[in-house]
Amino acid sequence: MAQTINDEILLQFIQQVFSTFDLTQRDAQICAENLVLADLRGIPSHGVARLKRYVDGMKNGTILPLARPRVIQDHPCTAAVDGCAGLGQIVGHFASQLAIDKASTSGVGVVTVRNSNHYGIAGYYSQMMLEAGLLGISMTNSAPLVVPTFGRDMIIGTNPISLTAPAKRNKPFFLDMATSVVPRGKLEVYDRLGKTMPEGWAVDELGRVTGDAANVLKNMVARAGGGILPLGGAGESLSGYKGYGLAVLVDILCGVLSGGAYADLVDSKGPQGEHQPANVAHFFMALKIENFVDRNTFCEKMDDLIDRLKNSARAKDEPRIFIHGEKEQERYEKHKREGVPLDDKTVQMLQTIGRERGVTVPF
Amino acid sequence: MAQTINDEILLQFIQQVFSTFDLTQRDAQICAENLVLADLRGIPSHGVARLKRYVDGMKNGTILPLARPRVIQDHPCTAAVDGCAGLGQIVGHFASQLAIDKASTSGVGVVTVRNSNHYGIAGYYSQMMLEAGLLGISMTNSAPLVVPTFGRDMIIGTNPISLTAPAKRNKPFFLDMATSVVPRGKLEVYDRLGKTMPEGWAVDELGRVTGDAANVLKNMVARAGGGILPLGGAGESLSGYKGYGLAVLVDILCGVLSGGAYADLVDSKGPQGEHQPANVAHFFMALKIENFVDRNTFCEKMDDLIDRLKNSARAKDEPRIFIHGEKEQERYEKHKREGVPLDDKTVQMLQTIGRERGVTVPF
């Protein structure tokens, strides 16, 4: 049962909810845009369904809605930012804008962030850089859900990587991927449907590959061992250590280089389940294309690269080869036209929050 | 049947072979070091076994051993380099040194390279940055061996990513990974042993998952369809589109941003099998750690991150959790001590080249 809601109406509602925490109109807009963009692009796991977690965080003090990010070190091409436990979206927007300004002036902008919170989809920030005419990279670490190769405890996050690059005729290349084989949301879908997961998604409490989503989710909540596998799956036969390596790469650039938290230190729950600052860390990089090649040549080569991939021979019975961001762009256009689909549970949650915060619910 | 050869003796021999093409002593040393380092680290696919390809390239004119890399654009934090069809190792060393110089001065050095050749292991260059006290990233595109998700033609390379980061008590983090699920060399091993490949390594001429290594290799040579799969395997169930996306990310940063070649344009063989410049493109980035966090804090956090991963609970029956570069470092120490193992075919090839080039073969 899904309801579809006009994205502008949804945006306004979410913005009003954030505003009840005394955010400026612009900051509330950034937070709302970030969540609604995820739904528009068909990534509901990072959309308005997460509103309750942000609201809860602001209520229990692990997210400080009025905190201002603080620049700790500032150089022409680089900056190190302390998020001061603010909203990840506001901190991320601030740091991305800093990277954009530096890249526009100096050709490169690299900005690390520590002490932030969940910042929504990584692609929101690389898209900011794209819209500023730059090549954009955005990464974040996240709460531990992934087991290292040959391990059975969740030590690293799903640590996503996003890169955007403009094309000319084609839509931009828009990669936004977790370095785990699947997100937790996929396990939840399989659990609800009672389906057996494919081998290579997750391991049980002893670190053995399993298809039992319900058991893995139960163990994950209880921290009883087991969790999601890195891209490439279990062991070495399909090179799971590569996905594991990419997750660590993201954690080094985000958590370690920022002087912040990493691995299982990134967590809004303490050992006894108590609330604590999540200490999420991010990494942003913007590159000025014209410092390397003229923009027109870049965009033409992007078109040709995309065409070579999309127009290459298809595997038997496969109707289409995609480029990254293409499916999400098509969903975006559909949802802009037809409204954003939300499941009943999410709609009810939004309605409850609206009532609690004294915001009129327009759906 | 393997013979072990002292690495210094091997290095000197390889250096002498390169010198017969009138390289400076330093350039010949760089090329030799690069190949021997791969063997020392236990990556024979990129070691001296490749010498014949380099020699053949210099003989048939697709590699110009005396070409000097040319800086096309130069800014405080960035540079764009034309490799002028020189040896990939010399071009890569030049560009990495440029990135190191820029990062040491300005905090970041990003250098793109076009019109180069196969540059050996990506980790050789990130290790240069590590030794210069920097965080180092090295990427390259490569000849097309990998099929895009839902495709059946080899359009993209195995496009590796390397990142090095120093620690304090622990060995450095040293990631050096192809974005394909396996390298071609793994298929060759399975072919020689007559073993069935695991599902998810490669597809046949119709793009169907296959375990038949001999058939895939035959098709790859004939360009008859089929090839290696990206990290994550076939289709979407284990997220093969992520490995595919990472391969494109590498190609954008290397091939497109450099204004060079990308996808199946990177190839030392033309459509009729004729020799042509390979037009390989690279991307190097060095980051000055102190621009973000003090070095001691960084190295201590790296130690803690590595410890948290390595000391976490192991999966049932697994004796050990590794960190990236650890196995290679252990092999390095063993091979330094006991000599570099080379198979008979490689030894014979080296002996033949030695005779041809008038270099005394010391083994």
Image: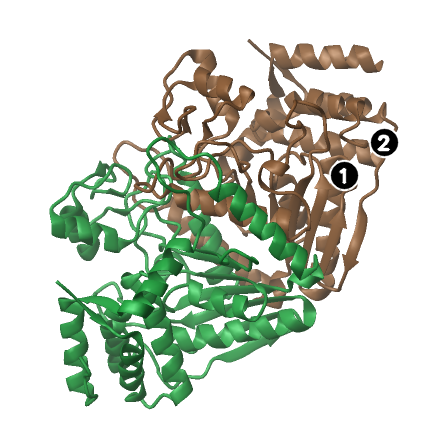
Chain colours: A brown, B green
Q: Is residue B211 above or below residue A21?
A: below
The residue that appears at 79% across and 54% down in the rendered structure is A72
Q: Confirm whether residue B319 shows in the render.
A: yes
Residue A103 is situated, as x and y percent measured from the top left of the image, at: 69, 60
Residue B223 visible? The answer is no
Q: Quadrant of the N terminus of chain A?
A: top right
Q: Residues within 10 Å of mark 1 (few under 14, many from 20)?
A: many
Which residue type carries mark 2? Answer: Leu
Question: Would you place residue B91 above or below residue A1 in this image?
Answer: below
Q: Are marks 1 and 2 in contact (CB under 8 Å)?
A: yes
Q: Quadrant of residue B279?
A: bottom left
Residue A94 is left or right of residue A294, and the answer is: right
Q: Which residue is mark 1?
A: A90
Of residue A142 and residue B262, the one placed in the foreground of this image is A142
Q: Which residue is mark 2?
A: A23
Q: Position of residue B363 (x, y in %)?
A: 17, 79
- Indicate the amino acid at tag 1: Ile
Quarter of the C terminus of chain A within the rendering: top right
